[in-house]
Image: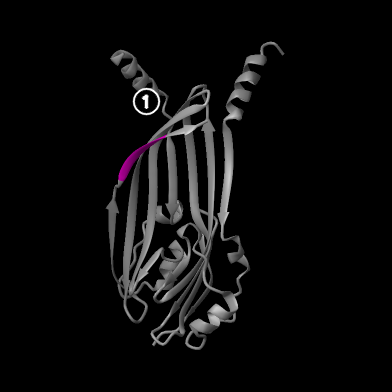
Amino acid sequence: MVRRLPIIILAAFFLDGCKIARDQVNIHVRDIDTSWIEPGVTTRRQVIDRIGMPPTAKGLGGVTADAFRWTLYDKRTGTLEAGYIVTPTFELSRAHFAEDILVRFDESGKVSLVSRTVSDGKNVRITEWKECRK
Amino acid sequence: MMRIIVLLFLFLFAASGCIHHRIGMPESAASQNRNWQTGVTTRRDVVAAWGNPHKISGDVWMWQEWISNGGKVKASYYMIGLTISNAAASVREHRLTFGEDGRLKGWEISESIPGGSKWSLWPW
């Protein structure tokens, strides 16, 4: 036990400055239903009426002249701050769009594209793709 | 006095930690060598590999990889603290242009390396 004491003290010292965090923004994006949208038929007004305007938290998602975008942003961070008085910080983070909905409109205000993707941070998968070409 | 300042600076430099941040398309997707073919590859093919584009400007769809590496150190004593950090970011942008038929017309990759350092003094 006496031999292990320095290791335990050292581990406690490092664990004290150890932090693991996960930051998810716009988590409600998972619950948005886009299956009813029909490219070439559904209008911008109908999209706003049923889903609302995209949020722009932290500059994510948003509205442009011809597109609406809803983004679920997922960030994982690991931090180690070891030291006393002077504390070097070791930090590693990965951020990705866990779920992303892109709705584009044509000049007449009708939906021209619905693209929905999910990502686990390594791979991307399309869960919905509806396109209306002229 | 000057010697103390130099020693302090060297100590801070030596004790500096390291930071790595990554935002944008998944690393595994970005690292794969995609052989997009003009006239063949569709928008859907690219979205299936990289996810939705981060920006759209007309028929130009853009995907970004943003990687930041740097160092950060905090010095604190009693009620005050000092944080010094320095980071170099690398932004790689893939711009793909599609035709009206939804097929690829061309693409380009650009890379910029903005950098910067900052410091802050804060109550502990």
Over which residues does the magenta segment extend? B115-120
The image's colouring method is one colour
Give the residue displayed 52% in from the left and 69% down from the top: A54
Residue A22 in the figure: left or right of residue B30: right
x, y percent for residue A113: 46, 78
Instruction: Please name whichever residue, A76 or A50, is drawn nearer the observer in this view of the structure.
Output: A50
Which quadrant holds residue A7?
Answer: top right
x, y percent for residue A23: 56, 50
> Is residue B109 found inside the magenta-colored segment of the image?
no
Q: Mark 1 lies on which chain?
A: B
Q: What amino acid type is highlighted by mark number 1? A: Phe
Looking at this view, name the residue that lies furthest to the top: A2
Residue on which the image places disc 1: B13
Q: What element carries label 1?
A: helix
Which quadrant holds residue A11?
Answer: top right
Give the residue displayed 37% in from the left and 25% down from the top: B13
Q: How crowded is mark 1: few (under 14 residues within 10 Å), some or many (20 or more)?
A: some
Q: Main secondary structure of the magenta part?
A: strand
Q: Quick one: quadrant of the N terminus of chain B?
A: top left
